[in-house]
Image (cartoon, rainbow, N blue to C red):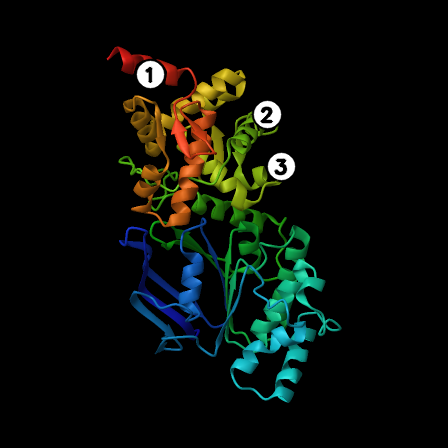
Amino acid sequence: MSLQLVDLKNVGKSFLSADGTARSVLEDVDFTLNEGEIVALLGQSGSGKSTLLRIMAGLIPADAGDVRYRGQPLYGPARGIAMVFQSFALFPWLTVQQNVELGLEARGIAAEERAERAEKAIELIGLSGFEGALPRELSGGMRQRVGIARALVVEPEVLLMDEAFSALDVLTGERLREDILELWQGGNMSTKAILVVSHNIEEAVLMADRVLVFASDPGRVRSELKIDLPRPRDVNSPAIRALIDEVYALMTASRDGLPAAEPAAKPLAIRLPEADVISMEGVLEMLAEAPFNGHADLPQLVEESELTDEELLPIAKALHMLEFAVVAHGDIQLTPLGRHYVDGHNALRHELFGQQLLAHVPLAAHIRHSLEQEASGELPEEPFLRLLRESLDKDEAERVLQVTIEWGRYGEVFEYNYNNGLIHLPEGEEDEQEDAAEKA
């Protein structure tokens, strides 16, 4: 039986919203990281994945539940746990050698031993000869290697990687991932378990022994897929393609296994997917044409569209939400309405989009109704932001309102003045509103 290195039971975490109320980010998270395994954690942005990693690293405390490292309660940073960040997090005024030595210096390691261990870690990660370079003199891939070397130099048992490859171009990310797997397979590092947070489904299947799918609002483990295939894995093999399909199905399904959709009683402050109308139209048009002819396997659509998983999945969710497509079991299928949209002229597309927006996005319908009640046909954005901040943090509230405004403008449901922050009815409708108010 494998040793449990990190064990989480019923872990919860909340942050204060702008109005002072607690907003649950994580709830009832149960998770165990065992010795000898790589685990990948997938989920949409804002689901709490990075927060979970920071709790496991001891950087922030959990508000509820139990967090243990090697059976002992974790109350702060543990010596056996190290973390690699997406943003590299290097000090620009320090050399590669000095950046790698930081963790050792913080532990009071003597200068001579620090230098020796740092040189070994730098060599291990393939950066020999760059010890005296500054971060600005390195490529993105090389900078991330410095971040990995800084984590490995403290000889951690547990390595946490938060989107460690996402800021890199595809080829550099693949090369670095392969190097990490080669070190892992060859036993050339002290690390006994790795947890990787990722948006890349293919990356997760190629790396992990287990893939966990995280749900949102609040974040929690929704499903788990075990992978018992040896590494290195061939991305084009039937077994790997089948697993990738299975993960897509898990990512696009609700907890009960049905297609992911918002609940019947939709709150105003739902997290709208990060999808712009041009991208949605592009996917619909591609889906309508050969070779898909209205129905596509999501992994194949990713390849054909040259979009990443992080880009395509929100688009698919938005099309499902607006009923232009149905997403289920890792596939996406054009609906009759979606086909009508693709075949329609520009004016019809605007009309259909606005119609579906009002029917399926409560915030858009609320804004439209509020504008219709105003004699001037216009309102400031701030009341709607305050409404969103009751359930969402400040940044997410602003993002959701911005998406709603962009969709609303395209659907000719309302307009927005970027100079003064006023939302108003479309031209022509404003004049009708004013005339009606004068007659009243």
Residue 296 placement (x, y as % from top left): 53, 33
Q: Residues within 10 Å of mark 3 (few under 14, many from 20)?
A: few
Label of residue 46 in the image: none
| Upstream in sequence: badge 1 or badge 3 | 3
Q: Amino acid at mark 1?
A: Glu
Report whether 121 appears left or right of 267.
Answer: right
Label 3 belongs to which residue? 304
**Local secondary structure at mark 1:** helix
Q: Residues within 10 Å of mark 1 (few under 14, many from 20)?
A: some
Farthest residue, direction left: 440
Farthest residue, direction right: 129
Asked if 139 appears above or below 118 in the picture, the reply is above
**Local secondary structure at mark 3:** helix
Label 1 belongs to which residue? 434
Which quarter of the figure is the N terminus placed in? bottom left
| Upstream in sequence: badge 3 or badge 2 | 2
Residue 435 placement (x, y as % from top left): 32, 12
Most foreground residue, 295 or 427: 427
Label 2 belongs to which residue? 289
Residue at 76%, 73% (x, y): give it: 129
Q: Amino acid at mark 2?
A: Glu
Residue at 35%, 67% (x, y): give it: 8
Report whether 287 appears left or right of 13.
Answer: right
Q: Amino acid at mark 3?
A: Glu
| Upstream in sequence: badge 1 or badge 2 | 2
Q: Residues within 10 Å of mark 2 (few under 14, many from 20)?
A: few
Residue at 42%, 68% (x, y): give it: 56
Q: Mark 1 or mark 2: which is in front?
A: 1
Q: Mark 1 or mark 3: which is in front?
A: 1
